[in-house]
Amino acid sequence: MARDERARVVANLFHEGGRRRPFVHRFAALMVLSSLIAVLGLLADSTAVVIGAMIVAPLMAPVLGVAAAIVMDWPRRAAESAATATLGSAMAIALAVAAAAVLPSPEEIPGEVLARTAPNLLDLGVAVSAGAAGAYAQVRRAAGEALTGVAVAVALVPPLAVVGITLQMGEWTLAAGAFLLFLANVAGIVLAAAGTFMLCGLAPRRQLISGRINVARGFRLAAAAVLLIVAPLEMTDQWRERRPINEDETRSAVKVVLEETNPDAAVISIEVDTEDGERTIDITASTSEEPIDVGDLAENLSEELDVGFELEVTTLEADSQSATVEESEEGDADIAVEETDEASNGDSASREAEPDGDQAPAEGG
């Protein structure tokens, strides 16, 4: 890199002297706005609004500053950038807790929130790729438009907002998962961005050679941080594969399968009981056509749930009537009621699932 190109990158990532105060004000304002946008988008379960928070968020600059300071062997600047990122992160979590306490709470945890509570190794891979892209966009001015895509690809503020929301809800496990996602993003960005800065020649060769010991130490620290993140990510991947499906997920799966196999059925209730490792699913539904085929339903559910269960279905016959209202000139209404089906006789069909033809319990897997 030429000297003027290097100076431009340094000026973009480090704000010192008279530029420090305006940067701090701008950084704080954007952190507040992006955090509030993220909380609103997450609670409203709106992907578009969450993407807006990603674009507004200013956290990428100090994180890339840490990576550049490692390559240039600037420990003071690395510490300052890390402190800026840490304070901004703490501000985002605090604002999310406060906003979630004031705003109406949804009846169920939104999907946009849940999507950021179970990180895996793929998320770390995205962070590494996006970190390299962000560093390259800083070095090559012509690639600067890629920074918006980088901000969307590896979100930093939405996971922090999820941490605050789930903390306010008392969901400690979900909060820990969201914070792990944030740490994975930061660690991947720093390691990949530092490597990209070095390959692009941000540090002069003579400086890189003279300070190779300190630079190597910085890379080792960044690599160690990534390895520390990989271990829990691998554990969560294995846990996710082995964990038993919970009762809420069971109800959701039952609704999906019923909509596919019996679209005319109206679900009245779905009771899930797990006791001594045995799961019982009790479904009550009404239908105006044929009763629900318990065997067929159990077979489809076994593929969806992948766990053993016992299925009981109660099908109520539905009444079907129609009414026609014709308003006369005097304002009186003439109502004609036509009963198209016989009224329900109150009988119900309750059968246990027999997916194999002669056994009631349905074995998943």
Image: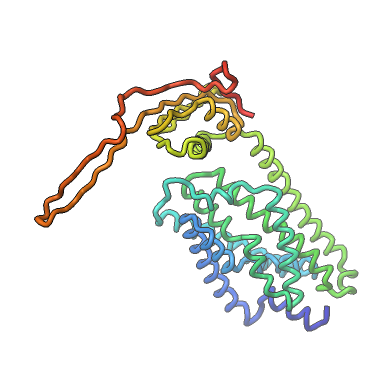
- Left or right relative to 160: residue 292: left
- Quadrant of residue 22 in the image? bottom right
- Left or right relative to 53: residue 12: right
Image spot of residue 246 (x, y percent): 54, 34
Image spot of residue 65 (x, y percent): 70, 69
The answer to whether residue 48 is above or below residue 165 is: below
* Residue farthest top in this picture: 358
Residue at 40% from the left image edge and 28% from the top image edge: 315
Q: How is the image coloured?
A: rainbow
Along the viewing direction, whichever of 149 and 359 lies nearer the viewer: 359
* Residue farthest left in this picture: 330
The answer to whether residue 178 is above or below residue 211 is: above
- Quadrant of residue 183 in the image? bottom right
The answer to whether residue 14 is above or below residue 92 is: below
Along the viewing direction, whichever of 180 and 224 lies nearer the viewer: 180
Residue at 30% from the left image edge and 30% from the top image edge: 342
Image spot of residue 172 (x, y percent): 54, 44
Residue at 69% from the left image edge and 38% from the top image edge: 238
> Where the N terminus falls, by quadrant?
bottom right
Along the viewing direction, whichever of 39 and 271 lies nearer the viewer: 271
> Where the C terminus falls, by quadrant?
top right
Count all numbered tags in the image, as a single digit.
Answer: 0
Residue at 41% from the left image edge and 30% from the top image edge: 284
Image spot of residue 35 (x, y percent): 52, 62
- Left or right relative to 118: residue 290: left
Along the viewing direction, whichever of 272 and 134 lies nearer the viewer: 272
